[in-house]
Image (spheres, helix red, strand yellow):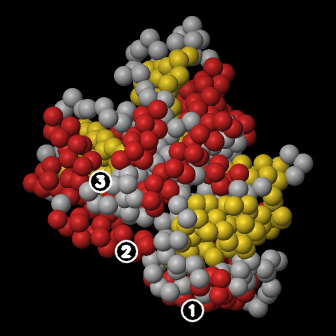
């Protein structure tokens, strides 16, 4: 299997890459936003963001001081030991990078300083018989996470109901999740599954077209409509409000239509690792699919 | 782009000369304060105690930085946090402490804007997430207060050098760019 130290090491490197380097697809989408923007105010915001990305990479410093909560998605041969190694890696990365210690008790707000806590970090383990182990990390800041939303739609509201709910969420969040945002949408499953799907959707490559025609049309339609709102970078007006819309689905109860929205800020951080049994590790910030 | 340079601390007329839509850079003193610091400031003042730092005329930065101490404190990453979280506490704090500038992201409520108009205070928006750009413009840590609140929530007294771009997004004359954009967005969203 995969040694504890290999997983721990991988987690530290994953977090360093995710926190300090903007993924290429997000970087390209931000550059494109600057190219098509004509107004001075939004241009000033996009230029500051892009310059910040370069400085962070140069210095190996976190792009944003809110280094978020590191949400992990693991697929392959994994179990409780994998979880323990990930926890060790997070504590080490918090010191080494450094990450801001964000994890606190919900009531007392006490902070262990390690980004560990009850149930933290969130790790989605998906055991599967595979010849490699995939670990993805999505550091999620609170500015965007605080605008997450779930609605249990009436099935008769259909795709139109989903579309309306997503637009309403983006309008309600406004300037606060740091637009231009990436919009993750989870449709179906149970209430908790819809939330996980929305978050998992944020791992997909921007611009990748879903193989599901309904989803692909919903994504491109929403992308266009959200950008027609004029909210713009940091909510100060402009042509680009979102960098992409990514939808994931699961089957659901015949009487339900759960839909969840997870927004990501322009600093849409993610990193992927693929571990092989012989100890080799491949890293990517766009995924392996 | 015409960028004006301003210096903190400022007096009332300087703060009132800032108009929504201006883009400025700031040099001089600023103090970080987030949720926990706001709570403690108000708790102390309500009980009739003094604060261990001065806020009058100052710039308050809504920011929970990443700091490093290798012999002395330095700023690693220091972008703004969502200012709207402080709307519940800001009006009273503005009236009691009379800061001249609030710096953050995302804007604040009409109640906060009202207090800003009364006192003569402007809200400057710094691009969210641009934490390294901010850190470079905050070269010196003058002091730290209330470290017991934890690194992000402590009050860091910092010296700024051409910190920006800062967009005057809410001014002491009652204009808010965020509100104007939000109104447009709402009208458009109904038609989609």
Q: Nearer the viewer, residue B64 or B122?
A: B122
Q: Is residue A104 visible?
A: no
Of the numbered discs in the image, which one, if any, rests on residue A162? Answer: none
Between B19 and B139, the one nearer to me in the picture: B19
Q: Position of residue B67 (x, y in %)?
A: 74, 52
- The residue singled out by tag 3 in the image is A227
- Screen quadrant of the C terminus of chain B: bottom left
**Residue A103 drawn at (x, y percent):** 61, 51
Dot 1: element: helix
Q: Residue furthest top?
A: A278
Q: Who is closer to the viewer here, B55 or A108?
A: B55
Same chain for mark 2 and mark 3? The answer is: no
Chain name for mark 1:
B
Whole-number angstrom distance, CA of label 2 to CA of label 3: 17 Å
* C-alpha span from label 1 to label 3: 36 Å
The x and y percentages for residue B9 are 74, 77
Q: How far apart, in angstroms, are the residues tagged by discs 1 and 2?
A: 21 Å
Residues at marks 1 and 3 on the same chain: no
> What residue is rendered at 34% in x and 55% in y?
A239
Q: Is residue A244 left or right of residue B159?
A: left
Mark linked to residue B180: 2
Q: Badge 1 is on which residue?
A: B118
Q: Residues within 10 Å of mark 1 (few under 14, many from 20)?
A: some
Q: At which x and y percent is residue A283?
A: 53, 22
- Look at the numbered disc 3 and give the secondary structure of its residue: helix
């Amino acid at each position: 299997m995969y040694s504890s130290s290999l997983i721990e090491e991988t987690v530290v490197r994953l977090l360093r890459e995710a926190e300090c380097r903007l993924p290429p697809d997000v970087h390209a989408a931000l550059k494109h936003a600057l190219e098509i923007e004509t107004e001075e105010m939004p241009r000033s915001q996009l230029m500051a963001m892009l310059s910040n990305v370069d400085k962070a990479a140069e210095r190996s410093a976190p792009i944003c001081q809110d280094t978020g909560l590191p949400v992990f998605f693991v697929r392959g041969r994994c179990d409780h030991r994998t979880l323990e190694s990930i926890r060790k890696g997070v504590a080490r990365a918090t010191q080494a990078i450094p990450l801001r210690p964000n994890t606190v008790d919900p009531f007392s707000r006490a902070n262990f300083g390690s980004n560990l806590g009850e149930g933290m970090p969130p790790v989605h383990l998906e055991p599967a018989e595979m010849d490699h182990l995939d670990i993805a990390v999505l550091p999620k800041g609170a500015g965007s996470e605080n605008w997450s939303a779930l609605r249990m739609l009436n099935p008769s509201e259909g795709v139109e109901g989903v579309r309306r709910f997503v637009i309403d969420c983006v309008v309600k969040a406004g300037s606060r999740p740091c637009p231009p945002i990436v919009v993750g949408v989870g449709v179906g499953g149970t209430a908790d599954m819809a939330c996980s799907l929305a978050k998992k959707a944020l791992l997909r490559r921007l611009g990748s077209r879903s193989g599901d025609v309904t989803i692909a049309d919903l994504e491109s339609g929403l992308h266009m409509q959200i950008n027609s709102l004029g909210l713009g970078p940091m909510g100060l007006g402009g042509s680009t409000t979102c960098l992409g819309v990514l939808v994931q689905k699961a089957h659901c109860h015949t009487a339900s239509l759960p839909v969840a929205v997870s927004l990501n800020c322009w600093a849409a951080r993610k990193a992927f690792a693929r571990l092989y049994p012989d100890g080799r590790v491949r890293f990517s910030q766009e995924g392996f699919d | 782009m015409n960028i004006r340079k301003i210096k903190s601390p400022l007096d009332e007329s300087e703060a009132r000369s800032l108009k929504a839509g201006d883009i400025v850079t700031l040099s001089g003193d600023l103090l970080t304060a987030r949720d926990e610091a706001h709570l403690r400031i108000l708790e102390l003042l309500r009980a009739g105690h003094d604060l261990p730092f001065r806020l009058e005329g100052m710039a308050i930065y809504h920011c929970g930085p990443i700091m490093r101490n290798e012999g002395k404190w330095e700023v690693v990453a220091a972008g703004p946090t969502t200012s709207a979280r402080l709307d519940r506490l800001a009006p009273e704090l503005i009236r009691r402490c009379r800061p001249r500038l609030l710096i953050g992201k995302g804007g604040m409520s009409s109640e906060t804007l009202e207090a800003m108009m009364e006192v003569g205070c402007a809200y400057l928006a710094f691009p969210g997430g641009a934490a390294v750009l901010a850190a470079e413009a905050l070269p010196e840590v003058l002091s730290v207060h209330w470290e017991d609140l934890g690194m992000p929530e402590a009050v860091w007294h910092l010296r700024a050098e051409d910190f920006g771009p800062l967009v005057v997004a809410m001014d002491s004359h009652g204009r808010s760019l965020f509100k104007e954009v939000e109104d447009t967005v709402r009208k458009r969203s109904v038609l989609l």
